Image (cartoon, rainbow, N blue to C red):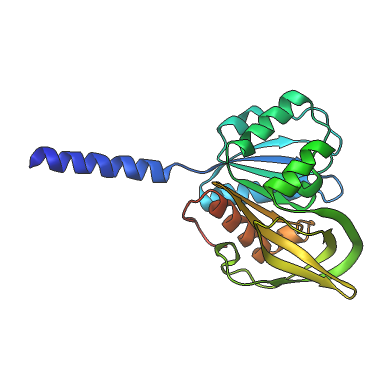
Amino acid sequence: MKSRFTLCLALLACTFFVDAAPIKIHFISGAREYKSEASLKEFIPWLEKSYGVKCTVSWGHDGIKELPNLSPLKEADVLFVFARRMKLGEDQMKLIRAHWEAGKPVVGVRTASHAFQKADNEIFDRQVMGGNYQGHFGDVAVKVVNVGKHPVLLRVGAITSDKLYKAGPLAKTAVVLQTGAIPKAKHAVTWVNEVKDRRAFYTSLGVPSDFKNDHFRRMLVSAIFWTARVTRLGNEE
């Protein structure tokens, strides 16, 4: 009886240890127009402090040919992309592809829909994230509305942003979470895409003012935890 009790305690301890391990997130930043670096340098410390995750970052810019500090991606649970039209070499793209090809979670923000060279972007935007980027309408007030119910939208209210992206027909596996409307157009803004065992999240939101919005930040947190299939823990803002 004693040995069985000891074994049960050991199993419980192992379970607790696994559950307690922090999510590892690797961020790729490189969108000058939308000030991805400034936004993420505020968001990441808040995220780590509030939710106990562990973050690593590759700071880049539009057109960059080699990202610094990309090796932590090998051990990351979640890849978070907020970058635009990078021109990375094959060695680095191979490492990035390996993440999504392994079925690991991906979160994409704003310009992630056109983060890479054309061939890789066709796969990343249309197959991994389930999107279909077609440009944008320019600066205009966009009313963003939640569609249906989903764990990522928990406690996420209405958001108004500054630019509507044109989203062509999405992948059949994509589920739209938010739409955005301007006087002459309405398009999908936020969606999730599950293919086999991989979960991906994308939103065309992400201008600097969005990162100041509690509802937007709450949605990003929920997206990270949902894609990683981990129960959300932490201090609510």
Check the image and name the residue furthest to the left.
1
160 up-or-down from 67: above or below: below
In-front residue for pair 69/223 = 223
58 up-or-down from 160: above or below: above
57 up-or-down from 156: above or below: above
In-front residue for pair 200/172 = 172
Which residue is painted at 68% across and 46% down in the image?
128
Which residue is painted at 83% across and 28% down in the image?
65
Q: Where residue 3 sits in the image (x, y, percent)?
A: 11, 37
The image quadrant that residue 63 belongs to is top right
7 up-or-down from 48: above or below: above
Check the image and name the residue furthest to the front.
172
Q: Where residue 99 sits in the image (x, y, percent)?
A: 62, 36
The image quadrant that residue 220 belongs to is bottom right
Q: Is residue 61 visible?
A: no
Q: Where residue 30 sits in the image (x, y, percent)?
A: 79, 41
In-front residue for pair 206/100 = 100
